[in-house]
Image (tube, helix red, strand yellow):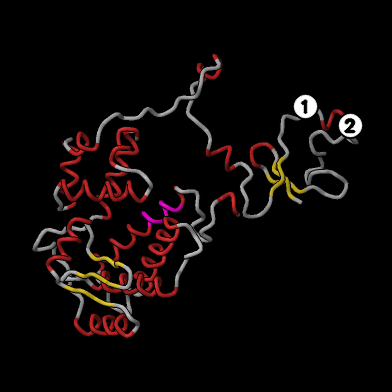
Amino acid sequence: MRFLGRGNLCLLVGDDGRFSNGLRYPGDPTGPASEVWNCRCTLVASMPGYDAFEDRNDSKLETSYEDWKAGRDSKRPKPSGRSLKEFMDTPATERAAQRAGVSKTQLRRRIVSQLNADGRTGRDFPSMTRAEQQEALRQAVELTRKQDKPRRRVKVVNDALYNSQKNYVERHGGKVIRGDKEWEDHLDKMGAGASAVGDTIILRNDATTSEVLEEVFHFWQSQRGDYSEFDAETMRNLRERDAQMYLLDSEEQYNIPKEENEQTKKAIDYYLGKLRGSGVDENTGLHRNQR
């Protein structure tokens, strides 16, 4: 058995009740007082893959020495009180939209979409701290692709690859819609480059290689029922994680452009962050208290 001493120093405990450095563990009733009393250390069982200090560390709040000495509560970040409309009207948000090549309306829709995925709505925006609001903006900018027509310069998927992927989907009972104006307007509202609704894949007329491969991969996932044992949000994030990893692994096979790979790397970071933020192990899909 291993035990963690003060400062997360890992020591082994032998059959004789002594640490590997020769000292006895704290409070050993058979040990001399000089060795086991007032040693000012903490004894915590340590098991591989489990952090005994995780909950304690997650619960830490900033506080000053003066507040601690006076017994005052730890400082908690204050809600900004700023509505989503007020936030979208700030110069910083306007500059962010310009850099991303999208309108403020599209960027707002992406932020609301992210809030909905987290179980919140635009009405919850004022209760978020300024840092949380800025993080929501940053993530929206990173994952938003310019949807104005014409779109930013992209390399359209070649016909041979598109047709082979389309045929695969149709052979397995799915449907691919490409270049439909009504559906492209729907993608504009979503702030998305492509989408999969049930067994139907929706693509723009100038769909990229990554967009085609990713949506067909999501079709495979839906057919197989990947991660269906988890709650909806965890399932979605795990599927997105796998899809982005698949794109990176397929870079050479399908000659995916470098610009698309950079977007994929950002997407992986985003979905891994979503998993960690919701307390889910990014490898197993289990919540920390289930490990």
Question: Main SS of the magenta segment?
Answer: helix
Dot placed on the residue nearer the N-terminal end, 2 or 1: 2
Spot occupied by residue 126 in the image (x, y as percentages of width and height)? 30, 33
Q: Nearer the viewer, residue 19 or 261?
A: 261
The part of the chain drawn in magenta is: 269-275
Report which residue position mark 1 lands on.
38
Left or right? Give the position of 257 relative to 152.
right
Quadrant containing the C terminus is bottom right
Place of residue 268 in the rendered image (x, y in percent of width and height, measured from the top left) = 37, 59
Element assignment for label 1: loop
Residue 271 magenta-drawn? yes
Q: Are marks 2 and 1 in contact (CB under 8 Å)?
A: no
Mark sitting on residue 282? none
Q: Residue pushed farthest right?
A: 30
Disc 2 is placed on an element classified as loop
Q: Position of residue 63 (x, y in %)?
A: 49, 24
**Residue identifier under label 2:** 32
Compared to residue 140, the image places residue 201 above or below, namely: below
Q: Residue at x 15, y 59 (%)?
A: 147
Instruction: In the rendered view, tell whether residue 192 sits above or below residue 199.
Output: above
Q: Is residue 16 left or right of residue 168?
A: right
Residue under the point 13% across and 62% down: 152
Q: Relative to 68, is 239 above or below? A: below
Whether residue 288 sits left or right of residue 201 in the image: it is right
In 3D space, how far apart are the residues under numbered discs 2 and 1 (Cα atoms)? 12 Å
Task: Write down the quadrant of residue 194 in the picture.
Answer: bottom left
Front-most of 20 and 217?
217
Residue type for callout 1: Asn
Amino acid of disc 2 = Pro
Outermost residue toward the top?
Answer: 70
At 50% from the left and 49% from the top, the residue drawn is: 279
